[in-house]
Amino acid sequence: QSALTQPASVSGSPGQSITISCTGTSSDVGSYNVVSWYQHHPGKAPKLMIYEVSKRPSGVSNRFSGSKSGNTASLTISGLQAEDEADYYCCSYAGSSTVVFGGGTKLTVL
Amino acid sequence: QVQLVESGGGVVQPGRSLRLSCAAPGFTFSDYAMHWVRQAPGKGLEWVAVISYDGSKKYYADSVKGRFTISRDNSKNTVYLQMNSLRPEDTAVYYCAKEGTRIQLWWFDYWGQGTLVTVSS
């Protein structure tokens, strides 16, 4: 159950687009279309942003989108806003009824 | 609306036990699997355990297997995490999280605010 690999930090200016990668293996990300993404403001409850690779829950801005290629999933945020500044975590089913998270990416809006 | 409220955290000595609770009003609790996820200080999220909608199936991360037990009481809309033989590395904020679908597709649509567990002598 090794953690998925995410960049420790990314940054962008308001209005720009950024992409956060999430690299796993053929045993998790590569095998299942069950990748999800969570936004976490410290001290608050994590919030679901993307599920099943690219689906967006009701109420989540369409500025957030997800994709997957091979063992790597990606979260793209377009039209960056100050309120997007947070930690972002990817998550994947890893087989044998277990789940693995990424190490988290701190997004800074400059 | 959906609410998840954790309780039971605190400071405990290594080797001792603690039981966390998560009250979950606002949805048909007995239809959904429930998870515990933790975050150690300065670290990322780590999945801990899951229990099926009816309590018949339970699965754990290797790091807690044999020490932690997840359970639920559908009459009280509550899920529990019994933590035994606690270690300093179990120090974390513990979140309960609701499975996003009835058929358990391993993503979480609602989370609680978390409860802090500190294991220290």
Image (tube, helix red, strand yellow):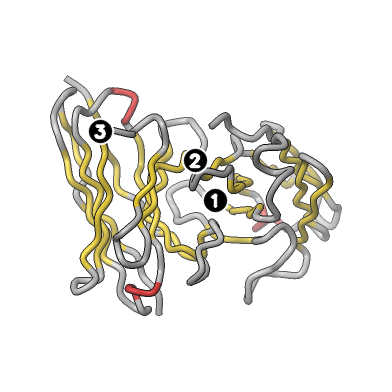
Amino acid of disc 2 = Leu
What is the spatial separation of the Cα atoms under label 1 and label 3, in whole angstroms? 28 Å
Query: Toward which corner of the image does residue A65 lie, by quadrant?
Result: bottom right
Residue shown at 67% from the left, 60% from the top: A52
Q: Are marks 1 and 3 on the same chain?
A: no
Residue shown at 75% from the left, 51% from the top: A75
The answer to whether residue B59 is above or below residue B12 is below
Closer mark to the observer between disc 2 and disc 3: 3
Query: Toward which corner of the image does residue B69 lie, by quadrant?
Result: top left
Q: How many marks?
A: 3
Q: Are marks 1 and 2 on the same chain?
A: no
In the figure, is residue A58 to the left or right of B15?
A: right
Disc 3 secondary structure class:
loop
In the figure, is residue A91 to the left or right of B100?
A: right
The answer to whether residue B101 is above or below residue B41 is below
Residue A33 x %, y %: 70, 55
Q: Which mark is residue B67?
A: 3
Other residues around mark 1 within 10 Å, as few (<14) / some (14–19) / many (≥20): many
Task: Please tell me which of labels 2 and 3 falls first in the chain.
Answer: 2
Determine contact: label 1, label 2, CB under 8 Å.
yes
Chain containing mark 3: B
In the figure, is residue B102 to the left or right of B89?
A: right
What is the spatial separation of the Cα atoms under label 1 and label 2, in whole angstroms? 10 Å
Question: Looking at the rendering, in which quadrant would you find the C terminus of chain A?
Answer: top right
Amino acid of disc 3 = Arg
Which residue has dot 2 on it? B45
Q: Are marks 2 and 3 on the same chain?
A: yes
Residue A69 x %, y %: 84, 46
Q: Which mark is residue A40?
A: 1
Other residues around mark 2 within 10 Å, as few (<14) / some (14–19) / many (≥20): many
Residue shown at 19% from the left, 40% from the top: B10
Amino acid of disc 1 = His
